[in-house]
Structure formats: structure tokens, C-alpha cells
Image (spheres, helix red, strand yellow):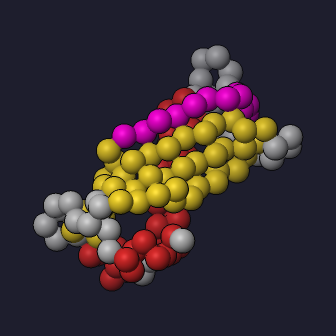
């Protein structure tokens, strides 16, 4: 449900809120697919976001955030998102984020190992 805290001065969901929902979905996906040991070995940082706003959402509407890995190469991974309104299945937002995998200890970029890539096939 869209909470009042997500609503901007124009009466619909604030653009920054959509980005926050995307980041929360990415984190939840990572947490669901990995264990604590893997999360200590690797961390992700954002390189860039691209968001297309298609339709507005309003207070009290039920929405769904979908996310999946589109591709990966080297140290980078492209994650896609779609946010839809449940009532009419309208797409509200389409987004992509370029992520970079870092070594959990050194915080330096590291090539995405196959064991990590396989988690998101």
C-alpha cells in the first residue's frame, strides 16, 4: 500500500520513493538468494540508475515491485525493475541499475564469480 509518507506536493508518489522501492527490492532479492557468508565476501555498489516514469501512483494503492538480473559481465551487473499497480496491472515505473561487485574485505571491484551469477539465473 502506498503510504502517506510517499506522497509529494502534487498528490502522487514522489520520484525518489520509486527509487527507494527499487533499491529495497534489490536488497531483498540479494538477501533471499544468499547466506551470511556470501554477503560478507561480496558487496554491491551502484554505478548508475535509469528510471522511466510511466504512470502515477496514489495514496492507498497497492503496488508490486518486480526485479531481476538482466545481464552481467566482469564486475558489473544490470538489474531491471518494473513497478506495477495491482488494481489495473499498469506499469508505473521501468528502471535499470548498473551495479558493481566489490570484495567484502578490500572494497575493490571483483569479477562476478560464477557461484554468484548462478544464483540469479
Q: Is residue 62 visible?
A: yes
Residue at figure coordinates x 48%, y 75% from the top left = 119
Q: How far across and down, in percent of the image, does residue 58 sit? A: 73, 31
Residue at figure coordinates x 78%, y 38% from the top left = 90
Residue at figure coordinates x 51%, y 59% from the top left = 69
Q: Quadrant of residue 55?
A: top right
Q: How far across and down, in percent of the image, does residue 57 sit? A: 71, 32
Query: What's the magenta region?
Result: 48-61
Name the foreground residue: 73 vs 38.
Answer: 73
Q: Relative to 115, does residue 53 appear above or below in the rendering?
A: above
Q: How many labels does the image show?
A: 0
Q: Can residue 60 be seen in this view?
A: no
Residue at figure coordinates x 33%, y 82% from the top left = 37
Q: Relative to 33, does residue 60 appear above or below in the rendering?
A: above
User: On the picture, is 75 further left or further right than 70?
Assistant: left
Magenta run includes residue 49: yes
Q: Quadrant of residue 94?
A: top right
The extreme top residue here reads 10
Magenta run includes residue 38: no
User: On the picture, is 42 further left or further right than 55?
Assistant: left
The extreme left residue here reads 106
The extreme right residue here reads 88
Q: Quadrant of the C terminus?
A: bottom right
Q: How far across and down, in percent of the image, does residue 82 sit? A: 64, 46
User: On the picture, is 109 further left or further right than 68?
Assistant: left
Q: How far across and down, in percent of the image, does residue 78 sit? A: 44, 52
Amino acid at each position: 500500500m502506498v503510504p502517506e509518507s510517499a506522497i509529494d506536493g502534487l498528490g502522487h508518489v514522489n520520484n525518489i520513493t520509486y527509487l527507494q522501492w527499487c533499491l529495497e527490492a534489490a536488497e531483498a532479492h540479494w538477501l533471499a538468494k544468499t547466506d551470511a557468508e556470501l554477503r560478507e565476501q561480496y558487496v554491491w555498489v551502484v554505478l548508475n540508475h535509469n528510471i522511466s516514469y510511466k504512470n502515477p501512483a496514489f495514496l492507498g494503492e497497492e503496488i508490486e515491485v518486480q526485479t531481476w538480473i538482466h545481464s552481467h559481465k566482469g564486475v558489473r551487473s544490470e538489474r531491471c525493475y518494473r513497478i506495477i499497480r495491482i488494481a489495473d496491472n499498469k506499469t508505473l515505473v521501468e528502471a535499470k541499475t548498473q551495479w558493481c561487485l566489490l570484495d567484502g574485505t578490500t572494497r575493490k571491484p571483483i569479477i562476478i564469480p560464477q557461484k554468484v551469477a548462478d544464483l540469479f539465473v
